[in-house]
Amino acid sequence: MITRRGFLDTTATGVVLAALGRAGAAFAQRKITPGPSDVLIVTDVQNCFVPGGTLPVGGGDEIVPLVNRLGRAFENVVLTMDWHTPGHISFASSHTGKKPFETVMLPYGTQVLWPDHCVQGTKDAELVPGLRIPHAQLVIRKGYRRHIDSYSAFFEADGKTATGLTGYLKERGLKQTFFVGLATDFCVAWSALDAVKSGFTAYVIEDATRGIDTGGSLGKAWKDMTGAGVKRITSADIDMS
Ligand code: VGL
Ligand code: ZN
């Protein structure tokens, strides 16, 4: 649900805009008030991706308070978890002579290789203890097949094996997806791109994400996302009052 603040707005912002006159009104930011068909998708806020974890994303822990605040503004929240088998194909340790952040060619395409991370059932794979969104309704685990990775919460890395999230969101009448979490350039970007492909509107709340940025991946991810129609916003665009 999108509301536009007007001249008759009696909030502090409205008063300031009224004082600025027409010029001010032109800059009036529309805020998004999350409603019943909006869903916040909290991507992989797990111990593995914050400092101290096995694949730490710089500043990954810094987003947690903001993610919690955003969570309170959304009645619908889905959590995702990267959830790999031991010896997963995305681990450099599964490929002789390969080091983390190198790539290999797999039947489904190029795979970046990672340190062993988010192994099923380990402390490393748990949601970060500071994450407080008790009303989250669904946890989607992904990347749980040994021979196929899944950055996206919608489709595994072959681009066609569905996780079930599309059906879940559609059956619940959820239409606008808002992404936060880790990492901007992998699981957040791939999920947001697939959300658009599956017919959802997709927003990425940039200040509630952090990127890995290996080999130019962060710049490429934003280019791909904005090119596909993913909306790049910040938490200031969301009405959290
Ligand atoms: C992720 C690399 C490997 C992510 C998951 O959550 O962005 N990145 N596995
Ligand atoms: Zn992974």
Image (tube, helix red, strand yellow):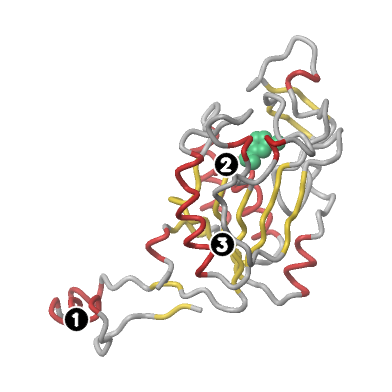
**N-term mark: 2 or 1:** 1
Q: Splitting the image into four quadrants, where does ligand 2 fall?
A: top right
Look at the numbered discs 1 and 3 and tell me whether their residues touch, using CB distance below 8 Å.
no
**N-term mark: 3 or 2:** 3
Assess disc 2: are there few (<14), some (14-19) or many (≥20) residues with their C-alpha within 10 Å of its C-alpha.
many
Residue 35 circle label: none
**Label 2 belongs to which residue?**
183
Name the quadrant containing residue 47: top right
The three-letter code of the residue at mark 1 reads Val
Residue at point 67%, 73% (across, down) = 174
Residue at point 47%, 48% (across, down) = 63
Residue 178 circle label: 3
Image x and y of residue 67, in percent:
51, 55
Q: For ligand 1, tell me if the residue under mark 2 lies within 8 Å.
A: yes
Q: Nearer the viewer, residue 183 or 61?
A: 61
User: Viewed as shown, does residue 126 lie left or right of 211?
Assistant: right
Residue at point 64%, 44% (across, down) = 187
The three-letter code of the residue at mark 3 reads Phe
The three-letter code of the residue at mark 2 reads Ala
Name the quadrant containing residue 94: top right
Q: For ligand 1, tell me if the residue under mark 1 lies within 8 Å.
A: no
Image x and y of residue 120, in percent:
79, 38
Q: How many marks?
A: 3
SS of the residue under disc 2: loop
Residue at point 75%, 35% (across, down) = 122
User: Viewed as shown, does residue 80 lie left or right of 143?
Assistant: left
The correct choice, above or below, for 212 with respect to 87 in the image is below
Residues under labels 1 and 3: Cα distance?
A: 30 Å
Residues under labels 3 and 2: Cα distance?
A: 14 Å
**Label 1 belongs to which residue?**
15
